[in-house]
Each structure stands twice: as structure tokens, then as C-alpha cells.
Amino acid sequence: MKNIVILISGRGTNMEAIVRACESERWPARVAAILSNRADAPGLQFAAEHGIPTVVIDHQHYPDRTAFDTAMRDAIDAHAPDLVVLAGFMRILTPAFVDHYAGRMLNIHPSLLPSFPGLRTHRQALDAGVKLHGATVHFVTPELDHGPIVMQGALDVLPGDTPESLAERLLACEHIIYPRAVRWFVENRLRVQDGIVHVHPAEPQWFLALSANAGVAGIPS
């Protein structure tokens, strides 16, 4: 039974999707704790309602990023994590923190990496005129929004899309690919070779969710 610790800063909808999938699909794992850098993060209430221990480490109470990351690491390690999941955790992590969880920390980024790293990804996508936009689950490395890609999901950009509408539609895609990637990890199905992630036994590492007016929808089984 593997222990999963999830880090959030806000609503934590991806956290909710992972918790629900872990329960309904009977993963060989449990969500051992939810940590947040904000006491008012709405996702903490969901965690409490599901009987999951919560911890708040307020970054404003620490003199620098290193001190905050040290406190976070100690709180996480108290739950003996096999996997650390970043689910809307809005803090840049120090290299030492990332290295401590090398190979056992996942993140989801709202773009098809390596395109559009950083912030304002939906605005970046619209300004670039891309026809497909998406999200990427990847192992975390010290380089921001970088690391071996586990799974990606994509959708078509519609006429009249705004950053807000694109973000909202993409959430449904994120809620499919992130739990799937986490499940692969806890089932020991992920292998990284030369920076490329493989799933054994093989499954599609993509999800395509096109709108009805596109005439096509793809969902890997």
C-alpha cells in the first residue's frame, strides 16, 4: 500500500479527482495527507470531509524559500510518502526540495509541454493561435515546468475561446489524465528511459477530447 501526499494552494479539483479515483478504483495506495501553503484553500474542506489529514504550512511565516521548503519537506516526510503530487500548488520549489523527491513527485501543467511553460498558459496559447491546447502530467525536475512526460491531454481551441473558457474546458481533461498517471505510478507501471516515460503494460499516454462540432472524439481505453 503506497502513501500519496498531495500539495494544493486553492480549490484542489485535481486533488479531488485523484482522491475519488483512488477510492472508487481501489488503488493499491491511499492519500495519506493533503498539505497547503494557504489556510483558506477550499480544497482543505474536501480533504477533511473525506477523513484525510490536512496540514497548513503558510509560506508567509518563513523568511525565505529554503526555510519554507524545509518545513514542507518535514511535514511531508512525516507521512512516509511514496509519491508527492502537486495539484495546483502555487509555489516555486527549490532544487534541494525537488531532488529530495526525485522520481517520486508529479505535477500537472496546463499546456502541452514543452510549449507554454510558466504562467498565463491559456493566454499564451490563444495569442499563438494554436488549434490544440492541453495539459501535461510530468515528473518534477529542478527546471520549472520540465521533466519526463507521463501523459498529455488535448482539446481543440474554439472560435471565441477566452483564457477563462479554455481553462474551464481543460479541467475536465486534467481530471482524466492526472488520476490515470498517478494510478500508473502506484501500480509500478512507469519506467523512465533516456528521459522518456513508458507504461508497462503499454497504454496510450494521451487523451484527446474534441468538441462536438469537430466531429471526432478520442478516448484511449
Image: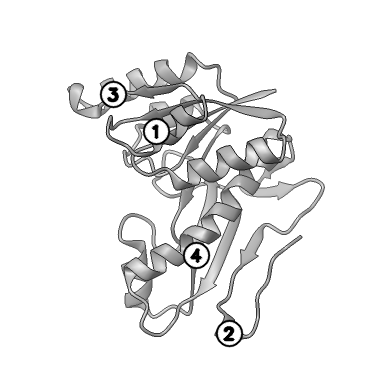
- Residue at the image position 35 percent from the left and 34 percent from the top: 93
- Of residues 55 and 146, which is closer to you in this image? 55
Of labels 4 and 3, earlier in sequence is 3
Of labels 4 and 2, earlier in sequence is 4
Of tags 4 and 2, which is closer to the observer?
2
CA separation in Å, label 3 and label 2 = 46 Å
- Residue at the image position 58 percent from the left and 33 percent from the top: 103
Q: Which mark is residue 134?
A: 4
Disc 4: CA contacts within 10 A as few (<14), some (14-19) or many (>=20): many
Check disc 4 and report its element: helix, strand or loop: strand
Can the viewer see residue 214? yes
Disc 2: CA contacts within 10 A as few (<14), some (14-19) or many (>=20): few
Residue type at mark 3? Phe
Check disc 1 and report its element: helix, strand or loop: helix
Q: Residue furthest right?
A: 201
Check disc 3 and report its element: helix, strand or loop: helix
- Of residues 36 and 21, which is closer to you in this image? 21
Of tags 3 and 2, which is closer to the observer?
2
Residue bearing mark 1: 45
Disc 1 to disc 2: CB gap under 8 Å: no
Residue type at mark 1? Gln
